Image (cartoon, rainbow, N blue to C red):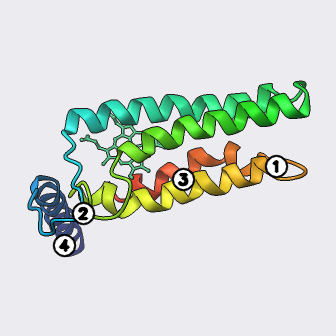
Amino acid sequence: MLLTRTIRLAISLYVVGMIAACTTTENSSFDEPVVYLENDEVRFMMQKLAAMVFNLEKLVEESQNFTDTERQYAVVEQLGEIEKVALKLGAGSGKTKHFVIDSGIDNFLNEIALASTEAKGTPPQYTLAQGLINQCRGCHLKR
Ligand code: HEC
């Protein structure tokens, strides 16, 4: 069918485009540091990120009978660890020259910051922390 073929073509063009985007490593500006990421490093950090975000979700659930301060500390701490890994993924648009990461990392970092602000609030809220796993889609729908 023509429609199916058009969709297939669109998908294969998209995939080729993404591979090209991932292998472009030109540095066009001097003052902006470029973070070169090997695919293996990205995979490694993703696995780490995935484990940490799952942990965070579990932590929010299981810390319900901690004291308020302990719970808040634990959640904010874990969000901080997640942020550290996310920052290694480029820390801003255009720095890794990896299209999917560069176009999605700012939003992901922003969601981490929002979750953290919410958890530090009075009274603390953990809805965004618990839902952080949904923000993985920001990048993964593009894949
Ligand atoms: C900034 C964009 C971005 C965000 C945010 C993101 N990912 Fe990824 N993820 C990628 C890219 C790009 C790859 C592909 C790496 C490769 O195969 O080279 C990937 C790959 C993966 C993989 C496969 C790793 C492997 O071993 O091949 C897993 C699992 C994963 N991500 C989980 C997650 C989870 C869970 C989250 C949310 C906590 C998340 N990702 C958030 C961009 C992102």
Mark 4 CB within 8 Å of ligand 1: no
What element does badge 2 sit on?
loop
Dot 1 surroundings within 10 Å: few (below 14), some, or many (20 or more)? some
What element does badge 4 sit on?
helix
Q: Which mark is residue 135?
A: 3
Which residue carries the number 4 mark?
A: 6
Callout 3 amino acid: Gln
x and y percent of residue 104 in the render?
Answer: 40, 60
Ligand 1 quadrant assignment: top left
Which residue carries the number 1 mark?
A: 125
Q: Nearer the viewer, mark 3 or mark 2?
A: 2
Callout 1 amino acid: Gln
Mark 2 CB within 8 Å of ligand 1: no
Q: Which mark is residue 96?
A: none
Q: Calculate the distance from the C-alpha at mark 4 to the C-alpha at mark 3.
A: 30 Å
Left or right: where 76 falls relative to 122: left
Instruction: Locate the N terminus and report the quarter of the image it occupies.
Output: bottom left
Q: Nearer the viewer, mark 1 or mark 4?
A: 1
The earlier-in-sequence mark between 1 and 4 is 4
| Proximity of marks 3 and 1: CB atoms separated by less than 8 Å | no
Q: Nearer the viewer, mark 4 or mark 3?
A: 3
What element does badge 3 sit on?
helix
